[in-house]
Amino acid sequence: MVIQIDETTKAKRRRFLLVASTPLTLLVIVTASLSFADETAVSPTIESLRTLDVVPLPATRDWLVEAIDRKAGLYRGTHPAELVLDNGLLRRSFLVAPNVACVDFRQLASDESLLRAIRPECRVTIDGREYEVGGLQGQPIQNFLRHQWYDNLRSSETALQCVGFTSGRIAERFVWKPRTEWMATRPDWPPRGVALVFHYQAPQANDGPRFEVDVHYDLYDNIPLIAKWFTLRNVGREPFKLDTFVSETVAYVEASSQVEDLIGQPLPNVHVETDFTSCAMDGRGSQRDTVHWLPDPQYKTQVNYLLKTPCLLECRPPLGPSLTMKPGDAFASFRTWTLAFDDRDALRTSLALDRMYRTIAPWVAENPTIFHVRQADSNSVRAAIDQAHAVGFDLVLMTFGSGFNIEDESEANIQRIRSLADYAHDNGVALGGYSLLASRSVSPEDDVVNPETGKPGGFARFGNSPCLESAWGQDYFRKLLQFYERTGCDVLEHDGSYPGDACASERHPGHANYDDSRWRQWTRIRDFYRWCRAQGIYLNVPDWYFLNGSNKTGMGYRETNWSLPRDLQEIIERQNIHDGTRFKTPTMGWMFVPLTEYHGGGPAATIEPLDQHRDHYERRLQNLLGAGVQACFRGPRLYDTDETKNVVSKWIRFYKSHKAILDSPLIPLRRADGRDWDGWIHVNPQLDTPALAMVYNPLEQPIERSIAFPLYYAGIRNTSVVVMQDGATRSVHVDDRQHAKLDLTVPGHGAIWLMFKK
């Protein structure tokens, strides 16, 4: 995104930094993208570091169980020129002279050095020339970096030089209007932590572009997580083109060494994720275009004979951005988050990812119950709102195939939907609808163009797809904004979101050509989702746009599975929840309940008539609400008799009564296989009820089982008071492995739940 900085903005954002090499020179840096609380401007000198505290010892508590007694901060290291970002769990250290370079990146709980060699802070390519930002040279080998070598390191004459740094509290990335009625607790926004920005100037060549770069770091409290990005400004008198960039590059310690062919080579024990995402339903898959683990050609002393060990991280856009920046323009890269795991245990990895998303995308904790009404006529929608209100559902969505058309901007349609939204809100229910963006053809003039043929087709991820910066695309987003501003609706299911297609058209108004098309389309969808987040519009998006404001995606399923017989669906449902919550929170994924036929299957696949299949309906509610996972209940109604209504109401009350623990991290006990019991346990050591377990029996006959419940991550030690669903209580011993063993009877085709208290 290019931002024009006017004189008013300049006046508000100036920071004055003294340059050590020219003490009588006053340098003014315009920091257009900074918005810190309690900002402090410091010159990059050894003297400036002496005022900082010495970096303290690492935290000793398990951050996944207890709040640690350390906050993120800025410290001085053991070397006189060493500046340290540290939160007790993760440390990133920099030398600030003769230029800034990262010289240590350390997971403190495992005391593991992640970094083996110095690289530039970032790289930008402008008018065909690549510029390194920061960095130091002279490291004798690339296997490791010794403190004794620091004094012999030198700055590249062509690299951008650091002229100062700014620190403060973390600022919000964008505005969030939380829907607190759908959350058990309201998380911090912006997240707590410390922000650090290094300011760089380009070499002052008479014939080159004049620009400045700020490299930003956010280190968060209570989690081994750090974010990085850069901003660039044209401070010259001539325009230039930002061709591309590498916003993060780290020479990581290799995860293993293999002399010959690399077979099953593990990567360094970190999760790296950017907010530049596209078509994916999981965090790792969403990074295939921006996060690259590469061989390091500078690493000549590695064990692998062909020098192919994947131990160099580069984060860069897949194309472009290829943006022309006029004098005064500013550009912000995408952000990269690095979560450093303390070991490779699958459960700890899963819980760490859960904490990461709750920290940097806290809107994922909004978890409304969702009714997909099949008909969008006013009578059907009002009836759906009435039923949702009667049983405690939070949200009604006019689903695909219902006749709802968000692109209909006729006055009659706008006023009709406005009336329905008002009616819904009067009943405490949110209202919205479905819109398909991609995976369809709009017109030859507006679809993405294949660079090989100069025509649409055969290139887009879904075969054909509209370009978001075509005339149609720009008008589509205008219609969406107008719809929500005028109707007051507060829900959008945005299907086929931007899948990452580039476009070779040179006639679309929103991009110049192929090279800039992907960046500009991503900016369009990013800014729209952020606008929705600021308005409190709930976003169901079947792609990984969480870091830019979406609330929920698919838990991980195959749609045609809902044409299977009902009894098979309920087992697969629990499998999907078990597997999907290994890399997302329960509140981040939706499931699906076909109250009426969906993808075929006939009467055996559906629940209607609801009262005739009330037992199965209840099992689906037990599955989903017992997991804290919401489903899209798709049909014309939520109940058809008072008995059915009572069943739905009972489980909605159960979920809302225990929402805080049910929306908490889920630990699997046994994966569903249809052969024996399965279940999971929710844990949250900060709650009065720090654990709630669900145990399911897929068999026809009752079963008696002795089950060990893991309570370490619930913070329970020695003994626990167990509260059964019938209200009975008992005391149970917690063994040295922090497990509590209970003998339980589970009814046939049934489930039981039990709570653990300290």
Image (cartoon, rainbow, N blue to C red):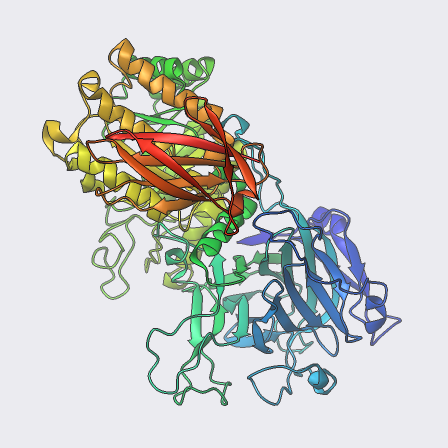
Q: Residue furthest left?
A: 602
Residue 269: x and y, percent?
48, 66
Residue nearest the viewer, comparing 716 with 85: 716
Percent coordinates x, y for residue 220 in the rendering: 63, 52
Q: Is residue 316 left or right of residue 432?
A: right
Say whether residue 408 is left or right of residue 39: left
The quadrant where residue 77 appears:
bottom right
Q: Spot the residue most to the top.
A: 642
- Residue 53 vertical placement versus 134 (above, below): above
Q: Residue at x 64, y 87 (%)?
A: 138
* Residue drawn at 80 percent across, 66 percent down: 43
| Quarter-of-image position of residue 215 | bottom right
Q: Measuring 48% from the left and 60% from the top, which residue is drawn there? A: 271
Expressed as whole percent of the image width and height from the top left, the position of residue 133 reads 62, 72
Out of 125 and 268, give the one closest to the viewer.
268
Query: The C terminus is located in which quarter?
Result: top right
Residue 249 is situated, as x and y percent measured from the top left of the image, at 53, 71
Left or right side of 154 for 15: right
Q: Is residue 524 shown left or right of residue 634? A: right
Q: Quadrant of residue 550?
A: top left
State whether residue 658 is above or below residue 64: above
Residue 430, visible in the rendered structure:
no
